[in-house]
Image (tube, rainbow, N blue to C red):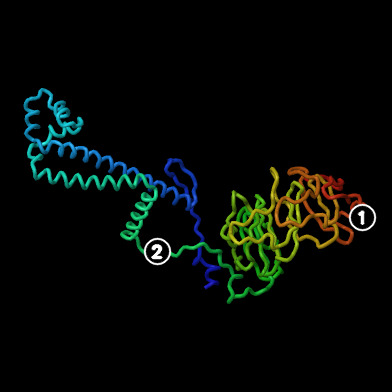
Amino acid sequence: MRLLLAHTSLETNASINLTVLGVTGTPRQASLYSIIAEWCRFRLATVQRRTRHRLTAAEKRIHILEGRLAVLLDIDKVIKVIRESDDPKIDLMAHFKLSEIQAEDILEIRLRQLARLEGIKIGEELAKLREEAKGLNHLLDSDEALRTCVASEIEADAKKYGDDRRTFIEAAEKVTMSDAKTVSIVDEPTTLIVSKHGWLRSRQGHNIDPTQLTFRSGDALLACLPCRTVDSLILLDTKGRAYSIPASDIPGGKGDGLPATSLADFQDGGKTCLALAVQSEKIYLVAADGGYGFRCKGEDFMSRGKAGKAFLTLGENESPAIFMPAPSEGEIACVTKDGRALVFNIEEIRLLAKGRGLKLIDADPGKTALDDIIPVENGAAGKLKGERLEICRGNRGGKGKLVRASRK
């Protein structure tokens, strides 16, 4: 089962864009919690408005019935006032202490509606309306009673319209081959191939000739990485974010492979610019073209989710420039595009889990950018050796010495 979940679409992650209008009518992104909280506030306000509307209607009806009840016991006098008065409404208001609304109602109803039998019905309706008004007033005066009313209505709707969930949804980490206790990864040599457009594939063994590799039209080789199937491929994007992909998850066989976007969710428009196969226990060196960098452990690159992790902090207009295994000891030579080199001991570079790091050489993005870092082995750093190497020695963060023509 874990093998199928790791390599098929039986398990998938679904991204949801929760853009809502809300009660203000302004589009915004909201969390699930804030959506539910706002809906609850809206529902409370709706029930409150409904209660006020019902109370207003009940009080209006009570007022009318109280007027009818006031004249019910003296129908003859009512008829006499209406028959003899020039302004019956004013006289009814004066004789029976009625409001204008009550007097208008008396003038509009039929006489039989004031009969004794109707009087009993009026009394029953009035009692019922007064009890209803009392309950409505209690809802408006008590926040607890209002919330209890809303909750009971929701429960009633859920009981009437709800059904059992048919899809199982839960927060879970992506299943990978390393998670499978019953399935172990065979530790064998493999070569990971990364193209500049972000296509990934693997080949068995280490005897791979990069010049024989073919790519899609307009694409080319970014990195050809001999490693082991138990290692991890780390992609560093233009925003300094690191994405870890188990080497065993990268498909082999013929063809162009699959896009990195199917195994990593690149954030904020970032694109792959550097790639390296790493082991958790080893030390690596990363730096930006602005001249800042640091050492880190392989495990520091690892992330559980496809969204990766913020790793290399970049300055304005900077981009990642160096991603390489760090020498365990000895010196390194930092080389800039304008032909300067600075040689110092690797131990001067701090070991960090992430961040911007320390200033390795005085550099800036562009013509004076950091171009390469070369380990000093057997008294030489590439073509830099002897007296030329000696004059480049200095303190970390210095300007270095000009050793070759600048790169355009």
Label 1 crowd (10 A; few <14 / some 14-19 / many >=20): few
Amino acid type, callout 2:
Arg
The answer to which quarter of the image holds residue 264 is bottom right
The residue lying at 6 percent from left, 27 percent from top is 83
Side (left or right) of 156 relative to 315: left
Residue 194 on image: x %, y %: 65, 59
For the residue labelled by badge 1, is the local secondary structure a helix, a strand or a loop? helix
The answer to which quarter of the image holds residue 141 is top left
For the residue labelled by badge 2, is the local secondary structure a helix, a strand or a loop? loop
The residue lying at 18 percent from left, 46 percent from top is 125
Image height of 227 relative to 243, above or below: below
Query: Residues under labels 2 and 1: Cα distance?
Result: 75 Å
Amino acid type, callout 1:
Gly
| Mark earlier in primary sequence (2, 1) | 2
Q: Which residue is mark 1?
A: 386
List the single residue furthest toward the top.
86
Q: Is residue 211 visible?
A: no
Residue 19 on image: x %, y %: 47, 47
The residue lying at 77 percent from left, 48 percent from top is 291
Side (left or right) of 60 relative to 322: left
The residue lying at 69 percent from left, 55 percent from top is 274
Label 2 crowd (10 A; few <14 / some 14-19 / many >=20): few
Image height of 61 relative to 180, above or below: above
Nearer-the-camera pick, 191 or 69 = 69
Nearer-the-camera pick, 238 or 125 = 125
List the single residue furthest toward the bottom.
182
In front of the other: label 2 or label 1? 2
Q: Quadrant of the C terminus?
A: top right
Nearer-the-camera pick, 340 or 86 = 86
Q: Is residue 90 visible?
A: yes
Residue 278 on image: x %, y %: 70, 63
Q: Which mark is residue 165?
A: 2
